[in-house]
Image (tube, rainbow, N blue to C red):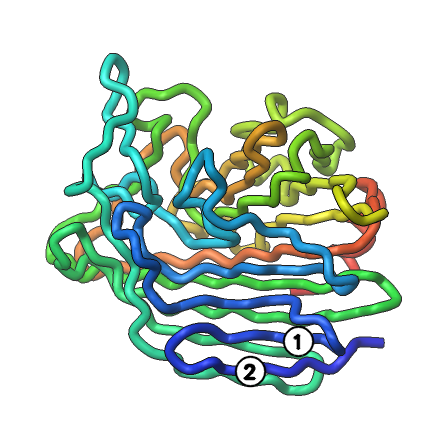
Amino acid sequence: MTAPLTVTHHLGHRVAVTAGATEILSYVYRPDPEPYESRKPYAHPVRTLAGNLVTGYRPNDHRWHKGIQMTASHVSGQNLWGGNSYLGPGVGYQRVPERVGSMRHDDFTAVTADGDRAEIAENLTWLNHTGQEWARERRTVTVHSVEPAEGAWALDWTIHLTNTRGEALHFGSPTTAGREMAGYTGLHWRGPRDFAGGQVLTPAGPTTDEAAMGTPAVEAPWLAYTATRDDVDAETTLVFAHAPENLDGSAIHPSHWFIRANATPTSAFSWAFFEEFELAAGASFSYRYRIVVADGLWDADRVERYLKTHAW
């Protein structure tokens, strides 16, 4: 049985989704104060049904990591990830404020709760550092399958992006710029500090972040991360999964997994890990993702059963 949801819109600031007495999602759309961190909406705090936090915010190692965010680390010379920009071998990361762009919230087309399903539909504009409009995005963030008996709920995140720049946009990553195995870009999750040292799972079973890093999503359509928590006697599992259309050859570019489990617990659905792709002027692309937030320690078999019984 699923639990009913409540949506509260705190105007000008955030949208909160509550299951029972627990606020499980806060979607913040007002600009953060620091432009160098690449201002853009983010989801934080995100919590399990038991109330345990699963997102980090402005950790001291990467102040621009904020919960769950749509990012783009390399877009035609602009950085919509935040922080220092990777400029290539021999140069490395440099503080280049004029490369840091932003994603502007324009308006919501829906902020609704219908029983056990809540939806936030948003229009955004991607801007370069000088404020030029480079792309328009239609984003949908949906909370569903809130199941106390399962101890889990699901977050679907959809992006439809259109190039409005008037010339092609080129999407890449630090790896496409010359840094090995650093293909972070796309939808990104940063975990709290006590997720450090967690266990990485793929459909093949337990593995390490080094082994999973850069794995093609067509070979591993999902990746999971488990952690034993500080302060509370609890364990948590997060599952990151691609929608079928991301993997059937219709997406603009193949996806790979970015994952780190030690000092900086983080994962990203990287859409340009090893190779750049081009979005022509006026053209669009779409991706759809799912993040399952679960209390307890899941294994690969349980992840597989859950995903098979919760259809897209």
Dot label at residue 18:
1
**Residue sitting at x 28%, y 65%:** 104
Residues packed near mark 1 inside 10 Å, few (<14), some (14 to 19) or many (20 plus): some
Residue 99, x across and y down, in percent: 19, 41
Q: Secondary structure at mark 2?
A: strand
Count numbered badges in the picture: 2
**Residue sitting at x 72%, y 35%:** 201
Which residue is label 2 attached to? 8
Quick check: 293 above or below 298? below
Quick check: 259 above or below 11? above
Drawn side of residue 9 relative to residue 160, left or right: right
Q: What distance separates the C-alpha of mark 1 from that of mark 2?
A: 8 Å
Residue type, label 1 = Thr
**Residue sitting at x 54%, y 36%:** 257
Q: Is residue 247 visible?
A: no
Drawn side of residue 89 relative to residue 183, left or right: left
**Residue sitting at x 66%, y 76%:** 18
Observer-nearest residue: 61 or 98? Answer: 61
Residue furthest right in the image: 149
| Tag 1–tag 2 contact (CB < 8 Å) | yes
